[in-house]
Amino acid sequence: MKSSNKYISTLTVQDKKYQYFDLNSASTNINRLPLTAKILLENLLRHSNEQYVQPEDIETLAKWDTNSSLETEIAFVPSRVILQDFTGVPAIVDLAAMRDAMLDLGGDPNKINPLKPVDLVIDHSIMVDEFGRQDSFKNNTEIEVKRNKERYQFLKWGQSAFNNFKVVPPGKGIVHQVNLEYLARVTFVEERDGEEVLFPDTLVGTDSHTTMINGLGVLGWGVGGIEAEAAMLGQPVTMLIPEVIGMELTGKLPAGATATDLVLAVTQQLRAFGVVGKFVEFFGAGVKHLTVADRATIANMSPEYGATCGLFPIDEQTTKYLALTGRSKQQIEIIEAYSKAQGMWGSEAQKDAQYHDTLQLDLSKVVPAIAGPKRPQDRINLDDASSAFKKWLTEQKELAIAPNNSQQGRFESEGGPLNEDSKTSVSCHYNGQDFELDEGAVVIAAITSCTNTSNPSVLVAAALLAKKANELGLKVKPWVKTSFAPGSQVVTEYLNKAGLSKELDHMGFNLVGYGCTTCIGNSGPLPEPIGDAVREGKLTVTSVLSGNRNFEGRIHSDVKANYLASPPLVVAYAIAGNMNIDVTKEPLGTSKDGKPVYLRDLWPSQENIQKIVTEVVNESMFTEKYGSIYEGGDVWQNLETVDANIYNWPDSTYVKKPSFFTDMPAQPEDVKAIENARCLLKLADSVTTDHISPAGSIGNDTPAAEYLRKNNVEETDFNSYGSRRGNHEVMMRGTFANVRLRNELAPGTEGGFTRKQPSGEEMTVFKASQEYISENIPTIVVAGKEYGTGSSRDWAAKGPLLLGVKAVIAETYERIHRSNLIGMGILPLQFLSGEGAHTYELDGTERYSIEAVEAKQKQAKVNVIREDGSEISFNTDIRIDTPNEFEYFRHGGILQYVIRSLL
């Protein structure tokens, strides 16, 4: 590295000298910058010699003018990239296909190679097939590897074919917890031109909950797979200087309130305030009372409150956690010294920071809560939970009885009315017991996900609650499917050491796997008698999970109401067995001596929880488990792979060469107008990426199922959409196939249906799209607010592209999905503020024409011809926000841009 760079200073740690890019060399008042802005500024200084960084970019960011700097585009080069298997498999499939495209165009295929460290953790494929047994983990893991053998063989090939690419085998943990406990460096130490250089650990990941690492003071966020691929290949992430919102935390959590309760309060407040696309930074006296595990719980749910990230400072809590998880003393000393030198250490680093806006939250006011039945931000105080559920259920029934009710449209967008012929209970026989399965029954209770299973306090609390319940003779209700899926093997170690694993086992919460399971929709089937009863009575049943997502249709297709809760509350609701029960006032059950048992009788004290956590969680657990993190079991080790740089695409229904680069010209074509397009779907508000591209099970009567049957796949082996993301034929058939999707163009239907125009014939979205393509008719999607909320799912953009969608016109977009649309060459247009489809009385039967857009163009006119021949036109905002994004769009996608750049 050239020591003449004007931004370089020297730092000595343990008598060793390191170079770093000094923020004080770029600004006379660096303390005005929030932590996130400091990290972005350091990134610009370090890459100041690259063509994508201009001197004025550095100058503008260093001045940090909260009134006028938001229109400046800057480049951000993450230090590393992290993937999980659902999104990672298609990313590596794309890289393999890009090598083929480079060959076809006469280029060097080996240029398609990660230039940054890339880690992929296999954690999304484990499914709760078996539960409530001592061998559930063993059996589920065997089923997982058998189901996903072809995908795992492909990933093993990728590990040998690509540089800087490592795979963590299945059964090791959830990507975000592995990242927190092991992969994160916090401060990078890298040799450049003979010098040791220090710089912040930053990353992007192909999962929206990548933000969990923000709890450790590491800046990172979720992106789509296509954007992550570009980052791997050396392309910067381009962005406008972000708006940074400061959230001041004061006070301390009261007894009885958990980190889960806190994050639900944070999510509700920030979502109501509006932080979509913004950076959030936590500061204040309350921060010091939060452990890294607590901070990670809050940072994890950044997507749920809509922010790009939710960063905490690096301080004594950070170094304490790093020591606990086995990081070296030298590494910790470097992190502390570097953070202090850069003005990034603790609350001192934030006291003079200038935020675009500031909010406050008093931790002492947080009370126990759950969130649901369909969105993480819909927080409900625990003592209001049963009444809120009853009210929601009544509203749904009233709508079913009065379909012409003026509120019908609103409720359809929120989940639709219940069927008029639904019952309130069904007689059921299961596992040797006869019982009535009632409305509101909790049929799934899952301790799962990255959000809470990274936090020893809430897991020990759950186990202690189970212990007390066992002592009193309480049982989980027979209709509840229970599961325990922690995010790290260390969790099992400390629960075993505390003698608490057996308490969860006795309550039915046996280990089912180390992975996302229920939170991602891999809840597995309900026991057949339970599922049959739900469908027979059209019962509205519920799930309770310690996850971060509860969107409709995500957890299980038969479960209409889903609630997020802390792990101890998951156990409590499994005992109570029904959402109609007020767990704060009514007994959960009856003890073995015939007395009513209340939640307060079971709830452990904070002192007891902390005493056990302090006694049982230690450094050796982390060093032992992570010492073999890249070693898989025998099944993984014995997977056969071919050692070759170019992938030999097999005849597989899991991994198939995608068509994105077929017949791709060496130069991009001119951007063309969209003429006489038809509306493929007309959608309401809050359509999530789960609605657009579901991750869960593949229904037997879907186009994807038909394709699999034609390829000799038995129904028992259909697996999930998420597991088949390496096959575009399955995924395009699964686009807009969520069982809870309601297309206003096909009223009265749920699932992937539309009406093809102009005939009005009802058919699947896939069939209609193929007919439109064969007739050379482009299509668009019209949507409401928050289009693309949820997971950073690149197939939610890839799928529509393969269905022939050329543009989306929505009222507002979620950040990652808008970026993904551009990354696949789909034009994102936005109705002007306050406008929507209702403004122009659009019903989806019209023909739409959109002018060809140009670089820096802010608005595009949409011309509409109605069925009766009348015409209207309106302006829309073009949501291509930066010059770099327009280049990606002009090339037909970011990957096409990268290929042409490397030629």
Image (cartoon, rainbow, N blue to C red):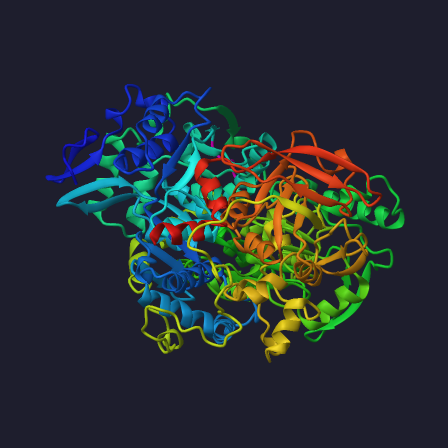
Q: Is residue 50 left or right of residue 138?
A: left
Residue 253 in magenta stretch: yes
The correct choice, above or below, for 532 with respect to 70 in the image is below
Q: Is residue 230 left or right of residue 852?
A: left
* Rendered location of residue 716, percent (x, y): 61, 76
Which secondary structure type mostly characterizes the magenta part of the structure? loop
Residue at 43 percent across and 70 percent down: it is 152
* Rendered location of residue 408, percent (x, y): 82, 44
> How many marks do you count on the picture?
0
| Residue 750 in sight in this render | no
The correct choice, above or below, for 454 with respect to 868 in the image is below
* Rendered location of residue 384, percent (x, y): 70, 40
Work out whether residue 657 or residue 350 is closer to the camera in this orientation and state it.
657
Dividing the picture into quadrants, the one containing residue 529 is bottom right
Dividing the picture into quadrants, the one containing residue 588 is bottom right
Work out whether residue 40 or residue 900 is closer to the camera in this orientation and state it.
900
Q: Is residue 198 left or right of residue 347?
A: left
Location of the C terminus by quadrant is: bottom left
Work out whether residue 190 or residue 546 is closer to the camera in this orientation and state it.
190
| Residue 340 in sight in this render | yes
Location of the N terminus by quadrant is: top left
Q: Is residue 21 left or right of residue 853?
A: left
| Magenta region, residue range | 252-256
Residue at 81 percent across and 38 percent down: it is 870
The correct choice, above or below, for 11 with respect to 399 in the image is above
Residue 69 in magenta stretch: no
* Rendered location of residue 817, percent (x, y): 55, 46
Dividing the picture into quadrants, the one containing residue 478 is bottom right
